Amino acid sequence: MLAHGQLALAKGLLIALFDRARAERVQVALICFGGARAELRFGPAVPRWWNERWLEPIGGGGGTPLEAGITRASQLLDAATRRDPARERHLWLFSDGRTTQWPARPRHADHVTVVDCEAANVRLGRCHLLAQAWQGECLDAHALLAPAQ
C-alpha cells in the first residue's frame, strides 16, 4: 500500500467515512492491521471528532495479516450481534489485495464493501475476487475520489 500513494488515499477515504458516520450518528470501529498484528484503534462508538492519532501509525509495505484483521473484525461483529441483533452491520475493508491470506467472510457482516486501493501497473484484481467470494461489493478507491458528474 506504500507505492503510488495508496495508503494516503485509503487514509483520506477513511476520514471521509468517519465524518459521514459522525453526521449520521452511527457506531463505527477502526481496526488497523500490519506487520503481524491487528489492533482496535477506535470504537465501537459514534465518532464525535476525528483524531489523527488513529491513522498516523498505520503503515504499509507488505506482509498484510489480513486473517488477523478479519478475525478481529469478526469478534467485534459477533459482539455487536449479541448486543443488538436487529441492527445491520457493515464491514468495510481497505486493501490493495496484495496478500497471500484469504480469510472466510465474517458471518455477522450483513454488508461487505471492499475498497480496492490497488494502483500498480499490473493489477491483480484480488479485491474484486474477495468481494465476490464474500458476496459483497467492490469499490475502486480512485473512483470514490472522483468529483460527481
Image: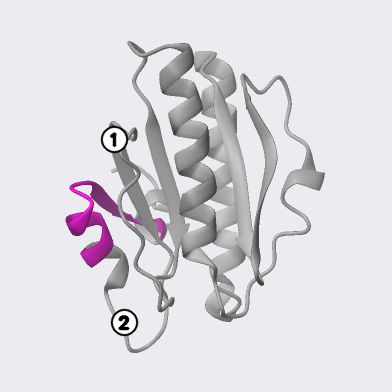
Q: Please tell me whether mark 2 or mark 1 is closer to you in this view.
A: 1
For image coordinates 29% across by 35% down, the residue present is 111
Question: Is the residue 59 above or below the residue 105 in the image?
Answer: below
Q: Position of 52 compared to 21: left or right? A: right
In magenta stretch: residue 134: yes
Instruction: Tell me if I can see residue 15 in this picture.
Output: no
Disc 2 crowd, CA 10 A, few/some/many (<14, 14-19, 20+): few
Judged from this view, the residue extending furthest toward the bottom is 122
Secondary element at tag 2:
loop
In magenta stretch: residue 122: no
Q: Which residues are magenta?
A: 129-141
Tell me the kind of residue under disc 2.
Answer: Arg
For residue 40, which quarter of the picture? top right
Secondary element at tag 1:
strand
Colour treatment of the image? one colour
Q: Position of 139 compared to 132: left or right? A: right
Instruction: Tell me if I can see residue 16 in this picture.
Output: yes
Q: Position of 52 compared to 1: left or right? A: right
- Of residues 9 and 64, which is closer to you in this image? 64
Tell me the kind of residue under disc 1.
Answer: His
Identify the residue position indicated by label 1 in the image: 111
Identify the residue position indicated by label 2 in the image: 123
x, y percentage for residue 49? 73, 25
- Of residues 54 and 77, which is closer to you in this image? 77
